[in-house]
Amino acid sequence: VFAHVVKAPEDPILGVTIAYNKDPSPVKLNLGVGAYRTEEGKPLVLNVVRRAEQLLINDRQAKLSVLVSRVKEYLPIVGLAEFNKLSAKLMFGEDSPAIRKNRVTTVQCLSGTGSLRVGGEFLARHYHQKTIYIPQPTWGNHPKVFTLAGLSVKTYRYYDPATRGLNFKGLLEDLDSAPSGAIVLLHACAHNPTGVDPTPEQWEKIRQLMRSRKLMPFFDSAYQGFASGSLDVDAQAVRMFVADGGECLVAQSYAKNMGLYGERVGALSIVCNAADVASRVESQLKLVIRPMYSNPPIHGASIVATILRDKNMFNEWTVELKAMADRIITMRQKLFDALRARGTPGDWSHIIKQIGMFTFTGLNKEQVAFMTKEYHIYMTSDGRISMAGLSSKTVPHLADAIHAAVTR
Ligand code: PMP
């Protein structure tokens, strides 16, 4: 009965790794998937995460035992209460008035993707406008997540290939002509794939326009602390929108900033205009989550709560986070310098101007295919490279490949 099922194409991002794994070349380089690698090209588990896991295993205090993953009990539908509280503080700030007034409901979800999906389904059921505007371009999973959540997806102009920067005018025009109340997906920082973020002044203009047109902000925060190295700086856009007293949604991921990719730990916050509304919203979120996966996993959230609740561990985390962000910034400089040294035609300053894990190189599909075939360098066909996958040793190889691709 399943014989008619046709083979589906690979996911465009995860498919890059599959192709990479099949390549026997010793010089092959995977710059496709957005996961941090050390200078040695190895995945990194943060020391503070290891320390939290040790604590969770060894802890014998009754106080902790209700939350530690050692007991392997089910969590409630909305996840670990302390994790939710601490995640909201991390996002909105230690003394956020919205939190103090209980206007925020936060539920633990399956990393950033799960938070987006739960938020999307909530909006499809309970919000009057079913259209969500996503930036052009955006993370490839966004349109699929929101379509399956029951929303209708449209795009707004974001990136200008000519300047390799923000198309601010186009963005404002498109949001201004969106129907009143429409949902707008915003990358909180380190826009994926372009690495192009609005300036604080531009964010303020976006905020004013969106509030006056009653557009609903849905922030995707997958890189807090990873872009600038500062958790607070990377939360500024979100906090600007929360400070005006209006509503918004935020999907948070700990995949990159704590290196907890496979633990699938994240949170969805919905900022409401009153405490009683937030409490009713939470009751409805439970009805979204329960038939979807019942309740979220315990281990990753216990690690995060253990780190966020303890001053020393929190500080240790920020140091390790800054080191990851700094290594990426160094890679940007090294790649830029290497291209300049080769006299590669073109202005490559966007490599050092762009923010976060990715560089949107401007290389076209044919150039990418050439680099994969001749240099065994793997990346998405839109020319996006993960700077986190690069090291001082591999920069020259990549620079050679880019040089060959553009002078061919
Ligand atoms: N949003 C954006 C913009 C991302 O880049 C990612 C990760 N690539 C995610 C969400 C979700 O990641 P995860 O589900 O692993 O937290």
Image (cartoon, rainbow, N blue to C red):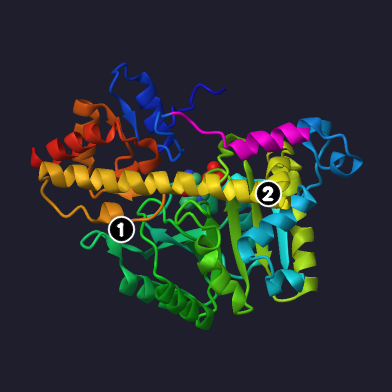
Image-based side of 162 in relation to 244, left or right:
left
Nearer the observer, 181 or 5: 181
The residue positioned farthest toward the bottom in the image shown: 212
The disc labelled 1 sits on which kind of residue?
Lys
The residue positioned farthest toward the right in the image shown: 62
Q: Main secondary structure of the magenta part?
A: helix
N-terminal-most mark, 2 or 1 = 2
Instruction: Tell me the distance, in whole angstroms, between the alpha carbons under discs 2 and 1.
Output: 33 Å
Residue 363 seen from this side: no
Image-based side of 368 in relation to 122, left or right:
left
Quadrant housing residue 404:
top left
Q: Is residue 336 magenta?
A: no
Mark linked to residue 353? 1
Label 2: few (<14), some (14–19) or many (≥20) C-alpha neighbours in 10 Å: few
Residue at 49% over, 31% down:
43
Magenta highlight range: 42-56
Residue identified by numbered label 2: 312
- 310, above or below 58, in the image: below
Residue at 40% over, 44% down:
327
Q: Contact, CB < 8 Å: mark 2 with mark 1?
A: no
Residue 59 seen from this side: yes
The residue positioned farthest toward the top in the image shown: 24
Which image quadrant: the N terminus? top right
- 285, above or below 263, in the image: below
The disc labelled 2 sits on which kind of residue?
Asn
Q: Position of residue 406 (x, y in %)?
A: 13, 42
Q: Is residue 47 magenta?
A: yes
- 73, above or below 339, in the image: above
